[in-house]
Amino acid sequence: MKLVSLFIIVLGLIAYAFVRNPLPDVDRDVCGLITSKNYPCELLHTQTEDGFTIGIHHMSNPGGKPILLWHGMLQNAATWAMNFPNQDLIYLLFDAGFDVYMGNSRGTIYSQEHTSLDPKNDSEEFWERCDFDFGSIYDLPAVIDYILENTGYQKLGYVGHSRGSTLMNVLLTEKPEYAYKVNLYAALSPPVHVSKTKSPAILLLDEARKKLYMNDLFSLFGVHNVGINNPVLIKMFSEVCKTTPIVCKLAIFMFAGWDFDSFNMSRIPVYISHPETVPIQDLNHGLQVKSSGQFSSFDYGNEKNLQVYGQPTPKLYKLSNIPLDGVKWMIFYGGNDVMVVPEDIHTLVDELHPQLLYNEPKYLPTFSHLDFVWGINANKFIYKDIVNAMLEQDFGKIN
Ligand SMILES: *[C@@H]1O[C@H](CO)[C@@H](O)[C@H](O)[C@H]1NC(C)=O
Ligand SMILES: *[C@@H]1O[C@H](CO)[C@@H](O)[C@H](O)[C@H]1NC(C)=O
């Protein structure tokens, strides 16, 4: 880890010397990105049952029907505001009259406060609770209920990218009553099954974990959280990407896959300048789902599993728990997505009751994992479908 950090710092310093004018969006936070495009934005907060304060970005459209969007791993709400008004889903939804909300997962820079735990000191308990087991059953209900209470509607629409869809998948299996608070759920590259993943970064981490006989990445990194959302590091990332975009393109490819058609190379400094922290347990959990082939809760080992789950093995998240007369799913997946590959999506679709599907899952042959949020043609292939489908939904009468 020290070597990696040193390498990044040296690279950053070299690049820094060459750089003059970064794109203005590089230095903007979520509301900065949105208001600079002449749209409204405010940061709201709500508290979860287990003491986290969750930041919610809101593009207020008073009286409009509410839609909640949730970002993926290594991201926060900024992921929805990376491009321009005719391109990003949030602007299309807003222009269609919707009241738009964007969640920020526990542990991201917008959701780091807790009633008793302190994230600053690499607090083990704080970062353990940033695992998706907890984000799903605490963050989502808190934010969904907050929005419904404040707008008076009975249902909202939900869009989840990658881990943002995992949160909804777990919520629907663990608290099925939420199937009646969401009318339509657009799942962008949803990772329920990841055993066939081809992501070089994930395969490398998994190999490292096995080769080094380290049962978890905590022993590999020596920390509970890899805080790459550090402002100094972010500055360096974006400078490197400005001077040598190909380096950053390669780094992105390592995770997500390659797509020439949808990716705007000249915006890489913007994409790379809003990274989020990686809670190690959450990463371990992802690798566990990959290796075991099972969509289940975190495996603490027999002894602690018994205490936490009342059984020696992790708890399976059963999609069959989801009621059939509630939320309907739209699924989108990509042929160049190395993170969540088509085969794994097919496995998910086979497991889902056909009644849960709003329409046939949509296959985008050229799309990589990040094109679903950053692709400059996602508006044409995905977002138009989502906006039109949301316009047809019943959001329940205003209370
Ligand atoms: C940080 O954690 C260490 C080890 O757990 C502890 O000794 C120290 O007092 C903590 N510092 C603060 C400021 O909480
Ligand atoms: C790509 O990004 C650059 C830099 O922000 C921008 O000027 C350009 O308009 C973008 N191209 C497209 C097709 O969105």
Image (cartoon, rainbow, N blue to C red):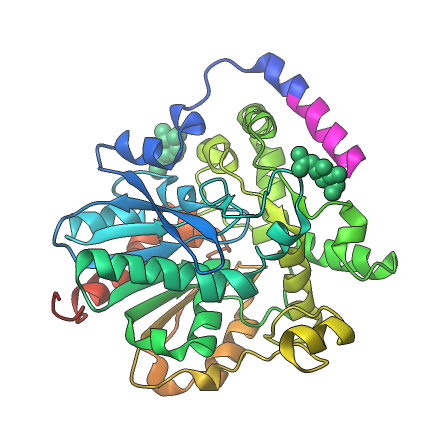
The quarter of the displayed image where residue 78 is located: top left
Residue at 44% from the left image edge and 26% from the top image edge: 27
Q: How many marks?
A: 0
Residue at 62% from the left image edge and 41% from the top image edge: 250
**Quadrant position of ligand 1:** top right
Q: Which residues are drawn in magenta?
A: 1-12
Question: In the image shown, does 170 or 28 lie closer to the viewer?
Answer: 170
Dominant secondary structure of the magenta stretch?
helix
Q: Is residue 338 left or right of residue 299?
A: left
Q: For residue 5: magenta?
A: yes
- Quadrant occupied by the C terminus: bottom left
Q: Is residue 111 above or below residue 321?
A: above
Question: In the image shown, does 64 or 47 lie closer to the viewer?
Answer: 47
Q: Name the spot of residue 209 as percent of width and height, x first.
A: 80, 58
Q: Name the spot of residue 322 as percent of width and height, x first.
A: 41, 82
Q: Is residue 182 above or below residue 242?
A: below
Residue at 29% from the left image edge and 71% from the top image edge: 181
Is residue 162 at all visible to an observer of this figure? no
Is residue 186 at all visible to an observer of this figure? yes
Q: Name the spot of residue 394 as percent of width and height, x first.
A: 17, 71
- Quadrant occupied by the N terminus: top right
Q: Name the spot of residue 57 as percent of width and height, x first.
A: 33, 44
Q: Is residue 381 left or right of residue 106?
A: left
Q: For residue 230: magenta?
A: no
Residue at 71% from the left image edge and 70% from the top image edge: 291
